[in-house]
């Protein structure tokens, strides 16, 4: 189960983590701690020194690791998955990282954090680090990178094109997958939705005789 | 006087009230340095400081079924300003629902005079004699457009914006239906157990003999709210409202 900083302080997560401990579930709780909940920094969200320590309250294993190191991320996940699969119970693993971009396209992070802090954080950017490491090992070079970039661009473009070619769903699809068999009242609504201009005729009221 | 949007009217009211009353504070996610995710709290931190404009950790939402609270839902910049002032000044807890779809949809003149609008009463936005249209929040816009369309057909619709959902003011609605004999209630929420159902039940209980036709509810469907491309098929639109009015007028 994955979650970001905000999800850790939300009421549902401690409940889930506690249940995983109490019932010895084979779960992995991955927290991606990027230090920010939109404009609110981690230090304002919780007084806990780290998020992984919340595992202690739940009686499960906790591990904090460098979330900007792809190899460390893999190692931490492997450890937690192995524990879960072998009946050893749940783990809460915390990937320490930093949100380099704005929260969304509607956000402007310069309103609430300094440019210096962001510049410093870029030095630990995980993909650059991995590339440097692989190049240093002789396992990567410019030619391979250019080829990968081309391939990725083609895949992304193809996916975007495929989506844009998808016809819009029809209105009756709003009523699919609601019930195994659509109840009468909803069949009526479905009819109304498909024929938006007219309403189903209103039944005249029952006479006293009909009601008896 | 400035022509401002609904979200700007909310900001104006917050500034006004925090300046007027030192006991008023604003708490929430991203309300401080960020000025609010939708910009509703811009400038509060700068003007009133971190002691009164506080960023808080994420918290659970309250539910409208809790007794002893008010639920208020503005439909325009003018009513957002006046009702928010009233909500802040009210000694009882108030859930003030802001329709983000209306945040920047249109502008109105709003005087920053600190005058609150009354809570617990509805607002008759348009007078008419043929049918009563009852609505609130984001649907007021569509309902007024439907009233315009109906006027072209010679149908005079009265439009009531209830504004305070809880406690609900049925007086104006009952008076209106007493005059018109017909009622269509419009809400974007789902149909079953909608707030429109509450109003319809009250009309049946206290206004039955004034009704010339069954009360019609125009609502969202009892489905999961669909994604963007189907949203217009889910929400009530002018055509559905107009069709309902024609139906109620034809009933005999």
Image (tube, coloured by chain):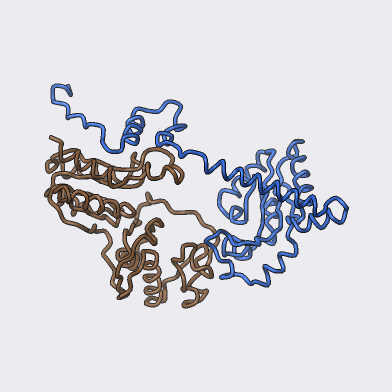
Chain colours: A blue, B brown
Q: Position of residue A40 (x, y in %)?
A: 58, 64
What is the x, y in percent for residue B75? 32, 58
User: Which residue is found at the position 53% from the left and 68% from the top?
Assistant: B34
Outermost residue toward the right in this view: A137
Q: State the residue in front, A53 or B20.
A: B20
Is residue B95 among the parts visible in the rendering?
no
Q: Nearer the viewer, residue A164 or A41?
A: A164
Q: Is residue B80 above or below residue A202?
A: below
Which quadrant is the N terminus of chain B positioned in? bottom left
In this rendering, would B156 be left or right of A136? left
Image location (x, y in percent) of residue B201: 24, 42
Residue at 44% across / 32% down in the picture? A176
Q: Quadrant of the C terminus of chain B?
A: top left
Task: Mark yes or no: residue A211 visible.
Answer: yes
Front position in the image: A185 or A47: A185
Q: Position of residue A181 (x, y in %)?
A: 42, 25
Q: Using residue B186 as the reference point, say whether residue A35 is left or right of it.
A: right
Count of numbered badges drawn on the protein: 0
């Amino acid at each position: 189960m994955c979650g970001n900083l905000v999800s850790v302080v939300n009421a549902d997560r401690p409940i889930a983590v506690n249940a995983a401990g109490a019932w010895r579930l084979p779960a992995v709780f991955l927290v991606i701690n990027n230090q920010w909940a939109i404009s609110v920094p981690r230090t304002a969200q919780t007084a806990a020194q780290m998020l992984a320590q919340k595992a202690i309250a739940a009686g499960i294993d906790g591990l904090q690791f460098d979330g900007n190191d792809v190899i460390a991320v893999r190692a931490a996940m492997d450890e937690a998955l192995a524990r879960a699969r072998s009946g050893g119970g749940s783990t809460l693993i915390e990937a320490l990282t930093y949100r380099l971009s704005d929260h969304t396209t509607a956000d402007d992070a310069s309103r609430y954090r300094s440019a210096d802090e962001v510049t410093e954080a870029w030095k630990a950017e995980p993909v650059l680090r991995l590339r440097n490491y692989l190049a240093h090992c002789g396992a990567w070079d410019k030619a391979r990178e250019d080829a990968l970039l081309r391939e990725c661009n083609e895949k992304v473009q193809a996916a975007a094109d495929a989506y844009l070619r998808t016809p819009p769903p029809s209105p009756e699809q709003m009523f699919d997958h609601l019930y195994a068999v659509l109840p009468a009242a909803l069949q009526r609504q479905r009819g109304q939705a498909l024929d938006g201009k007219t309403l189903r005729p209103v039944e005249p009221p029952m006479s006293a005789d009909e009601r008896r | 006087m400035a022509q401002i949007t609904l979200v700007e009217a909310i900001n104006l009211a917050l500034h006004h009230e925090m300046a007027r009353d030192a006991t008023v504070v604003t708490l929430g996610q991203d309300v401080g340095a960020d000025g609010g995710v939708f910009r509703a709290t811009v400038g509060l931190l700068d003007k009133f400081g971190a002691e009164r404009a506080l960023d808080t950790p994420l918290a659970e939402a309250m539910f409208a079924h809790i007794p002893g609270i008010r639920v208020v839902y503005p439909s325009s910049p003018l009513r957002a300003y006046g009702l928010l002032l009233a909500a802040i000044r009210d000694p009882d807890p108030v859930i003030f629902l802001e329709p983000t779809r209306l945040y920047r949809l249109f502008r109105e003149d709003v005087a920053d005079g600190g005058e609150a609008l009354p809570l617990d009463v509805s607002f008759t936005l348009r007078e008419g004699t043929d049918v009563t249209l009852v609505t609130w929040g984001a649907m007021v816009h569509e309902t007024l457009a439907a009233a315009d369309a109906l006027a072209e057909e010679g149908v005079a619709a009265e439009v009531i914006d209830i504004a305070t959902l809880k406690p609900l003011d049925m007086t104006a609605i009952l008076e209106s239906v007493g005059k018109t004999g017909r009622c269509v209630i419009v809400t974007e929420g789902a149909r079953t157990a909608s707030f429109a159902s509450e109003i319809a039940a009250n009309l049946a209980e206290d206004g039955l003999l004034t009704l010339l036709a069954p009360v019609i509810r125009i609502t969202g469907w009892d489905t999961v709210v669909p994604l963007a491309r189907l949203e217009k098929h889910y929400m009530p639109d002018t055509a559905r409202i107009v069709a309902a009015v024609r139906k109620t007028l034809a009933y005999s």
